[in-house]
Amino acid sequence: MLRYAAFTLRSAMNPTRLQIAKADIFKFFDELENPVLKLREIQSILSRQRTFWRLAQATSADDLIAFLTRHGRLRRLEFPFPQRPETLYVWGNVPLPVILLGLRKDVYFSHYTAMRMHGLTEQVPHATYLTDERSEGAARPPVALTQADIDQAFARPPRVSHNVVMHEGRKVWLLNGAHTGQLGVTTERVHDDDGKPVEVRLTNLERTLIDISVRPVYAGGVHEVAKAYALALERVSVNKLVSTLHKLAFAYPYHQAIGYYLERAGCKPALLDLVRRLPMELDFYLAHDMGPTRYVGEWRLFVPEGF
């Protein structure tokens, strides 16, 4: 006990350079534009500020992190995603949506989470969906689909990403999305699950409706998707939706499912015609592995029986 007291007294009498620079260091972190950091960003901060803070060359990023964690407001958060684990360092009280957008560069909220942020569901999902687009690669040649290709693909259960972790009692999915050049991704001020305003990157209304039609498994299923279309009907631009569909250039005729959802929601016939003009050369399916179905001839579409 006496030895520990003596050590504490020596520490107080001989403060480290980090302790001497504490006020300047805390001021710097308090004024950060983005308080969600990766290790390399803390290393960069230390490199740029070392002289101003008068820190020894031996002071490492780990030393700074340990000091900020012990004496300041820095938190270390682990996200052990199977594909690539991520570690974030968060300064202060930061809303969860802002923290999650720090996982990867240019990541954005999508699917069920974007639905929630746009007010397209009455549910409070216990999962968060983010999309991390793949980098641009060589253009793929057009795929000549046959009816057999579609029938076989949609008879099977949908592929579901395993890149998910638990964080604060909820699942966080980090989806590996196709390269779209961030098409339809916008920055908006929305309300988080606690009702607090927060600025986030997410898919816009039209892109969200397309994404949940393509992957209803990430949106609570086809009934939730249909409800989303009904809630979006007074706000959605069908022109913009069709334009976005053209740019996404899907191999599968997802416009047939989108047309059905729009008609079911009560879309005006003149606006539905914008979707009907798109080619409908093959039968399609509202979702994978639906069990008993019925056929909607107008859209050449199989839907769940009773739906």
Image (cartoon, rainbow, N blue to C red):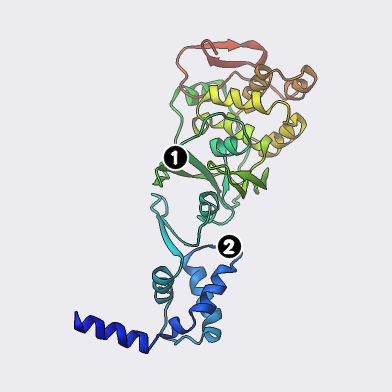
Of 243 and 154, nearer the camera is 243
Q: Which residue is mark 2?
A: 34
Of 11 and 237, nearer the camera is 11
Residue at (55%, 16%) from the top-left corner? Answer: 303
Tally the marks: 2
* Residue extending farthest right: 270
Q: Is residue 307 left or right of residue 173?
A: right
Mark 1 secondary-structure assignment: loop
Quadrant housing residue 12: bottom left
Q: Which residue is mark 1?
A: 161
Mark seen at residue 145: none
Residue 57, position as x, y percentages in the image: 44, 87
Mark 2 secondary-structure assignment: loop
Amino acid type of the residue tagged 1 in the rendering: Ser
Residue 200, position as x, y percentages in the image: 61, 49
Residue 65, position as x, y percentages in the image: 42, 71
Labels 1 & 2 near each other (Cβ < 8 A) = no
Quarter containing the N terminus? bottom left
Residue at (49%, 35%) from the top-left corner? Answer: 125
Amino acid type of the residue tagged 2 in the rendering: Asn
Q: Is residue 62 left or right of residue 217?
A: left
Q: Residue 294, relative to residue 144: is it above or below?
A: above
Residue at (52%, 69%) from the top-left corner? Answer: 41
Q: Nearer the viewer, mark 1 or mark 2?
A: 2
Check disc 1: other Cα within 10 Å, few if <14, some if 14-19, many if 20+.
few
Q: Residue 43, relative to residue 137: is it above or below?
A: below
Of 121 and 133, nearer the camera is 121
Q: Residue 232, relative to residue 301: is it above or below?
A: below
Check disc 2: other Cα within 10 Å, few if <14, some if 14-19, many if 20+.
some
Q: How far apart are labels 1 and 2 at the CA level?
A: 29 Å
Counting residues from the N terminus, which is met first, the one under dot 1 or under dot 2?
2
Quarter containing the C terminus? top right
